Amino acid sequence: MDDLPPPLILEILSRLNDSADLARCRVVSKILNALSAEVRSINLHCSYDRYAKSRAPATKFLVTPFKSVFNSLISSSKGVESVSIGVDKPLGGLSYDDVEDESDDLYLTDMDFSAQWLPIVAGQLRSISISDFWIQSCWRRSEVLSLISSCCHSLIKLELKNAWLSVDGLLGMPMLTTLTLEFIRLDDEDLNEVNNCFPSLQVLNLIGIGGLKEPKIHLLHLKTCQWTVSNAPLSLTIFAPNLVKLKLVCVKPRSLVIDSPLLSDFHLSLERASKLVVNEFSNLKTLQLESPYLCCLFDSFPPFRTIKNLTVNSTKRAESTAMVKFNLKRLFDAFPNAKSLNLGPGAWLEAETCFHTGDSEVSGGIKGLKQIIAHVYVKDMEISLSFISFVLEKCTNLTDMALLIHGEVESSITREFISRCMAHCARVRWRWGLWKEGMKDAWISYGI
């Protein structure tokens, strides 16, 4: 390998996914050792196997400490632009019920550890990703955010997972455009410090953030946001005038306010909100709604005449005769201009049930609807066939009908169901597939 041109060797070394392999290459030859220092990206993650060996009495003395390997890579590297360090997902999924671990060898947001390596590479860093070991980090409050903000002035992308983070001493980072915080206990209950110190964010991902009370996202340059919220916050507010794509998963906030006039792609999963304030989205084209009370959610929104691609699903709820159930009339009235409709299993079953009980009187349908994708149960074939016939009758311009049948339906019933559907209506192009909870949809035919 020493006979290869140095640029080619460097390219090969740069393509190694695991920097542990890079560390091994350094001891093979002088040329590899020299060129490995030129690699611009370090990616080191602790596997479950490595963790287990470091704890087993027979092998723990044979395992080089994880932090030592990382520090060695950092100290001999030149011009590092990207650092990714963490524990693999199987290890990150461990809990106190699985293991007791009060050491700090995998406490990766530790200030002492971070202060050893960050200043060495901070000047040229563009990206940092730290996925901590929750068992060691959840009870230790870290000020790594303040350290990063004080020395990484060219940072563009920051990702932190599985840690308890303080915002004390946090400085402004005007260059940062992408921020991901996942499974973080954050000492910023209203997100004031996030808004003030990261004003240039264009991409924000907040997944499972604890410690929030009345959080407000107020970011003028934000374009894409994914926000998964627990049931703790009393209110949620998003003010982002340039936001175009939003995925919001929440439970029961008393108040939900969204002021993002340029939003074009919106995914909302919500149990219910006592007060829901959503300004009209004149640019909204794609909408995905998940809720136990879909019809109530429809009533809370302004008219959705711009929606072209619609996905709805009714999630589980406690049965209540007082609540209005989801039916096609309410859907057609709320989204009169939809061209593509995707009905999740809960929405389809509820709409089918309402049709069977006579609670789905539809006058006009959606004339512009071209495609329907639906997840069906086929609990009663005759009811399902009647409902499909009803849908086809109301959607006169429909050209594509794609049905995914539940995987536990007997194959003989599935075959008969498919045959009768296709015989009933030849004007649409049929597609067929299978679905099952917790599994990816599987298409078995296209364009029949």
Image (cartoon, grey):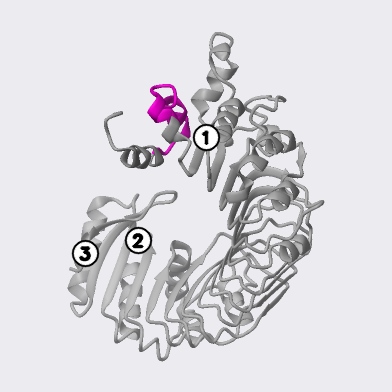
Nearest to viewer (mark 1 / mark 2): 1
First in sequence: mark 3 or mark 2? 2
Q: Quadrant of the N terminus?
A: top left
Secondary-structure class at tag 3: loop
Q: What residue lies at 42% left-to-right and 82% top-to-bottom?
A: 338
Residue matched to label 1:
45
| Kind of residue at badge 2 | Val
Asked if the residue under mark 3 is in contact with the one under mark 1, i.e. CB atoms within 8 Å, the reply is: no
Residue matched to label 2:
378
* Position above or below: 446 against 297: above
Asked if the residue under mark 2 is in contact with the one under mark 1, i.e. CB atoms within 8 Å, the reply is: no
Which residue, as the protein is rendered here, is positioned at the far bottom? 364
Residue 131 vs residue 337, the one in the foreground: 131
| Kind of residue at badge 3 | Tyr
Disc sitting over residue 446 in the figure:
3
* Position above or below: 426 against 159: below
Secondary-structure class at tag 1: strand
Label 3 to label 2, Cα distance in Å?
20 Å
Tell me which segment is drawn in magenta: 16-33
Q: How many marks?
A: 3
First in sequence: mark 1 or mark 3? 1
Magenta stretch, overall SS = helix
Label 1 to label 2, Cα distance in Å?
46 Å
* Position above or below: 78 against 225: above
